[in-house]
Image (cartoon, rainbow, N blue to C red):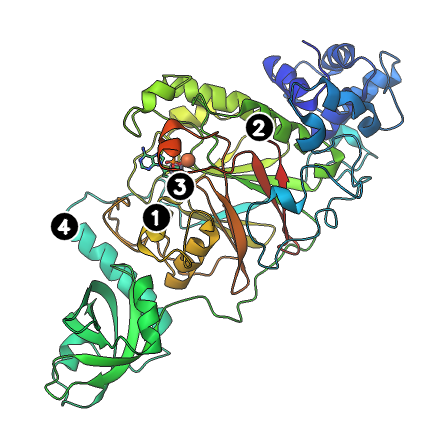
């Protein structure tokens, strides 16, 4: 097998039982005879080495076994694009040979199917300096371990599930939802419990905080929103001619809101003047990294599906080995690693791999194509082999073992992971289908999935509406609440690329690596496949790269 691309080198090293430093791979790719250089480097490495370092490779070069074909490894990979089996490598493949050229084919605005809400950078302005190699200092490469990349995790159900699915669990989860979210609203309204509102004199000012229990229209076209708190329920009337009537179509059952208004003369209903969502403060100021470092945000790989785009994934993995991607130190994967089995009716007709464990084996092989020093974080999705009900715990021991090659951090769905001081809320996104189905087109749609994400931020809950698509596993608390505001919100699931900023929070729905399925064809879902959104963690700017 010719070893002209970094991904092939990584695969070959993995086959021989080695992880590799990114710089080691770059050096091997730059050798005049990569295969011979790889053989020599493996020879040179100590028997107990698990990780091939740049030092091992340099040692073989110094010994004269092989040498870089050109002055820089990057130059040496110039002909990669022509040897790749990509049908249109010249137009779509991000160049691996010329870092930071003024115009990158495949990364122009035309490739990005959605709006930019001011968060995107100039496509080239933020690429990593071509000359930096942050992985090793080069002076003392013998012990050049990558910098410790600290990933801290919050809100992860993994190992903490206590739910038995009994009625009492639902009571505690909704009580916790109410407690947490009403806390966000308490300072803004002078609210009374439902039971107390009923006892107030007619005509009083009245405010309430509750979970939306029902929304119905009255005979004359006004809206009656029934709110529930821990003391009972109370009806609230929103008249159709008020501005706030425009917010009624955003309401989802079970979300927490506050209303202010006047009690009717018979004290039977509140006439609403103002409606509040828990929301993210407009002035929210996200944290950023204190060095130039990037994270790639992907999801929905769907390995095992006939439509999994192995070539596009391979190009992405190759690109991650280039100097241009040197600052990409994190890879976050927001669910649907594999296609799974029995997820949807007739899904088996489009399976390439029918056994779920074989799917994870193959996924793991594809994951090995990315640089071994990337810090990988992953959560499961609805196609993965964990319980479907949310919050979903991270993969079990058997699956972790299969995917252990790059020592990924495996957490539940949802989880908030903090990298370089930036908190990233990772959520697969099943509730997005619901939000898009229920809200008017301009507020949430498959073409603008980030707008549906804005709604979740506004409601401070990743899956407000219980029932329908969303299955809830009741736990002792509501893991789906956004108690803290994240700096970045990362979802997938709907297979559409979309991103923008909501009250300074960067929302990214990351597309997929699966071409259109028969089902998607039948319902006109046109997936955005083969894109990798790359976030600058020091500025929260986003660049989208296309590999399909
Ligand atoms: O789902 C990808 C997207 O496609 C998501 O918006 C749900 C939708 N989808 C895909 N297949 C089906 C079927 N069979 N029924 C309903 N909705 C579907 P993902 O779960 O990531 O494959
Ligand atoms: Fe998916
Ligand atoms: Zn999904």
- Disc 3: which residue: 412
Mark 1 or mark 3, whichever is nearer to me: 1
Q: Report the residue at 29% width, 43% height from top.
A: 161
Kindly report which numbered mark, 1 or 4, lies closer to the viewer in this rendering. 1
Number of callouts? 4
Q: Are marks 1 and 3 in contact (CB under 8 Å)?
A: no
Q: CA distance from mark 2 to mark 4?
A: 44 Å
In terms of sequence position, does the residue under pointer 2 or pointer 4 come before the other?
4
Taking the spot 29% from the left edge, 24% from the top edge, the residue there is 346
Q: Residue drawn 66% across and 54% down?
A: 538
Residue that label 1 marks? 431
Label 3 CB sits under 8 Å from any ligand 3 atom: no
Which callout, 1 or 3, points at the residue further toward the start of the chain? 3
Q: How far, Cα to Cα, is label 1 from label 3?
A: 16 Å
Secondary element at image label 4: helix
Spatial separation of the CA atoms under disc 4 and disc 3: 24 Å
Whether residue 473 is situated above or below residue 180 in the rendered picture: above
Q: Is residue 321 left or right of residue 262?
A: right
Quick one: SS at disc 3?
loop
| Circle nearer the N terminus (1, 2) | 2
Give the residue number, with chain letter if any, for mark 2.
Answer: 313
Circles 1 and 2, Cβ within 8 Å, touching? The answer is no
Ligand 2 quadrant assignment:
top left
Spatial separation of the CA atoms under disc 1 and disc 2: 26 Å
Q: What residue is at 85 percent from the left and 18 percent from the top?
A: 61
Q: Position of residue 41 (x, y in %)?
A: 75, 15
Which quarter of the figure has residue 357?
A: top left
Along the horizontal axis of the image, is 457 left or right of 167?
Answer: right
* Residue labelled with disc 4: 167
138 to 7, vertically: above or below: below
Circle 4 residues within 10 Å: few <14, some 14–19, many ≥20: few
């Amino acid at each position: 097998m010719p070893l002209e691309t970094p991904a092939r080198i990584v695969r070959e090293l993995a086959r021989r039982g080695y992880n590799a430093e990114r710089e080691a791979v770059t050096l091997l790719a730059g050798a005049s005879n990569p295969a011979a250089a790889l053989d020599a480097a493996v020879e040179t490495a100590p028997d107990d080495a698990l990780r091939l370092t740049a030092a091992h490779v340099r040692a073989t070069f110094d010994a004269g076994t092989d040498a870089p074909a050109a002055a820089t490894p990057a130059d040496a990979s110039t002909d990669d694009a022509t040897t790749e089996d990509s049908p249109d490598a010249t137009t779509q493949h991000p160049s691996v040979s010329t870092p930071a050229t003024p115009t990158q084919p495949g990364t122009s605005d035309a490739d990005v199917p959605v709006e930019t809400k001011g968060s995107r950078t100039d496509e080239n302005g933020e690429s990593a300096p071509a000359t930096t190699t942050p992985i090793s200092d080069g002076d003392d490469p013998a012990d050049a371990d990558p910098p410790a990349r600290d990933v801290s995790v919050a809100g992860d159900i993994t190992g903490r599930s206590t739910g038995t699915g009994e009625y009492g669990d639902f009571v505690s989860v909704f009580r916790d939802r109410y407690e947490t979210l009403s806390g966000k609203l308490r300072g803004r309204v002078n609210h009374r419990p439902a039971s107390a509102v009923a006892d107030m004199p007619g005509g009083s000012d009245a405010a309430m905080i509750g979970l939306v229990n029902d929304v119905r229209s009255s005979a004359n076209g006004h809206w009656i929103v029934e709110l529930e708190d821990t003391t009972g329920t109370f009806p609230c009337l929103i008249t159709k001619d008020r501005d706030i009537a425009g917010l009624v179509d955003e309401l989802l059952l079970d979300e927490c809101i506050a209303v202010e208004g006047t009690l009717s003369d018979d004290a039977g209903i509140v006439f609403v003047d103002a409606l509040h969502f828990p929301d993210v403060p407009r002035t929210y100021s996200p944290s950023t990294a204190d060095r130039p470092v990037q994270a790639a945000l992907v999801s929905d790989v769907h390995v095992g599906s006939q439509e999994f785009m192995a070539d596009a994934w391979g190009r992405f993995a190759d690109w991650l080995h280039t100097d241009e991607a040197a600052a990409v130190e994190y890879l976050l994967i927001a669910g649907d690693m594999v296609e799974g089995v029995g997820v949807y009716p007739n899904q088996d007709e489009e399976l390439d791999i029918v056994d779920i464990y074989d799917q994870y084996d193959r996924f793991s092989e594809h994951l090995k194509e990315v640089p071994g020093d990337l810090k990988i974080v992953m959560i499961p999705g609805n196609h993965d082999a964990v319980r479907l009900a949310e919050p979903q715990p991270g993969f079990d021991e058997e699956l972790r073992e299969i995917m252990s090659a790059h020592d990924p951090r495996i957490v539940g769905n949802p989880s908030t992971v903090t990298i370089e001081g930036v908190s990233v809320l990772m959520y697969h996104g099943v509730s997005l289908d619901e939000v898009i189905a229920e809200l008017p087109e301009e507020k949430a749609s498959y073409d603008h999935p980030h707008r549906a994400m804005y709604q979740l931020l506004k409601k401070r809950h990743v899956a407000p509406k219980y029932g329908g698509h969303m299955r809830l596993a009741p736990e002792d608390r509501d893991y789906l609440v956004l108690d803290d505001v994240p700096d970045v919100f990362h979802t997938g699931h709907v297979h559409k690329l979309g991103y923008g900023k909501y009250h300074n929070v960067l929302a990214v729905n990351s597309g997929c690596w699966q071409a259109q399925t028969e089902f998607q064809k039948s319902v006109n879902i046109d997936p955005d496949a083969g894109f990798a959104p790359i976030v600058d963690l020091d500025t929260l700017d986003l660049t989208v790269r296309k590999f399909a």
